[in-house]
Image (tube, helix red, strand yellow):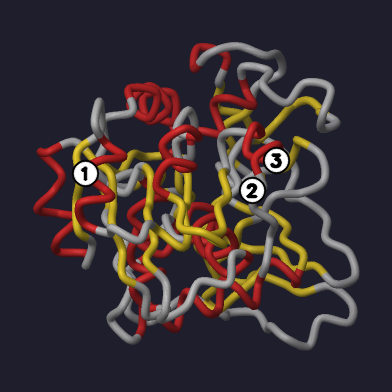
Amino acid sequence: MRAMTYDTYGGPEVLAETRLPRPKFGPGEVLVRVRRAAVNPVDWKIMAGALDGLMETVYPVVPGWDVAGTVEAVGIDTPEFAPGDEVIAYARKDWVHGGTFAEYVTVPVRALAAKPAALDWDQAAGLPLAGLTAHQLLTRLGTGASDTVLVHGAAGGVGSFGVQIARALGARVIGTASPRNHDRLRDLGAEPVAYGDGLADRVRALAPDGATVVADFVGGVLDTTLAVLAEGGRHASIADPAVLGAGGQWMWVRPDGPGLASLGRLADEGKLTVPVAAVFPLEQLAEAFELSRTGHTAGKIVIRISD
């Protein structure tokens, strides 16, 4: 099969198009024929060695954890899916090796969900990792209709999902973003506030009693979080472990098929959209990583692998 791989840490220049054997799949796994795979910053950060010492790496590495595709075959004791099913997954494994920027990938059934009918292939590939990150943080904090939620980084890839999910849970949402993204946040259902000096005052002007839930998707904002957190409020971060010393939760997304299915239902109900910024062919993965590294895309970057 065609795949993009690397065999040493580095930047996009270490990527190469390679031919690999089709991966084997065991009990409780499915083999997915990849239609689309989405780029996330964690992909090129891992390639640069960011998780060295934390996760085992087996070369050559096929990067990528987001996938949308069709079930090609199923392993033993896998009654939930059948060949031909259209599926999506956050396909992270317990080691860095067989990822989604390839024609085929194996996925544990626990990480799979049906592809939402409302999303095309490009959009579906962009949902799993970022959507689950926002969903798991907000649900772990018990977000509900009585909450006022502050989303740090509300216009980003994870933050925009956080806004939509919090709104779907019935919460009021205040979102931080640069002024150029404020109209987009209003369209998503958030009340926008600008970054920078005086942020806590601007949030308090909108919510004098404070935010009952604060979702940090950017890091470096703990002082602001504590300044606007309501008495008894809850907060968590995906980017700043310092929250652990301030009564918050630090989390990293887990593969979760049922949670992904919940997000799919929101999409099919018209409550969750997935903006796509750019689509590249598989052989241009290095260019896609370079675009992701700029941090200036307003939507997901998707790799088209088959139609």
Q: Residues within 10 Å of mark 2 (few under 14, many from 20)?
A: some
Q: Which residue is mark 3?
A: 244
Whole-percent x, y for residue 300 in the image: 34, 47
Mark 1 sits on what residue? 202
In front of the other: 23 or 59: 59
- State the residue at coordinates (47%, 78%): 144
Among the 4 quarters of the image, the one containing residue 196: top left
Choose the circle earlier in sequence order: 1 or 3. Answer: 1
Is disc 1 surrounded by few (<14), some (14 to 19) or many (20+) residues within 10 Å?
some
For image coordinates 28% across by 81% down, the residue present is 270
Residue type, label 1: Arg
- Of the residues under marks 1 and 2, which one precedes in the sequence? 1
Q: What label sits on residue 248 in the rendered view?
A: 2
- Image marks 3 and 2: residues in contact by CB distance under 8 Å: yes
Q: Which numbered disc, 1 or 3, marks the residue closer to the eye?
A: 1
Residue at x-position 37% and y-position 74%:
171
Label drawn at residue 218: none
User: Label 3 is placed on what type of residue?
Assistant: Leu
Q: Is residue 276 left or right of residue 282?
A: left
Q: Position of residue 294 (x, y in %)?
A: 32, 22
Callout 1 secondary element: helix
Quadrant for the N terminus, please. Answer: top right
- The answer to whether 124 is drawn above or below residue 93 in the figure is below
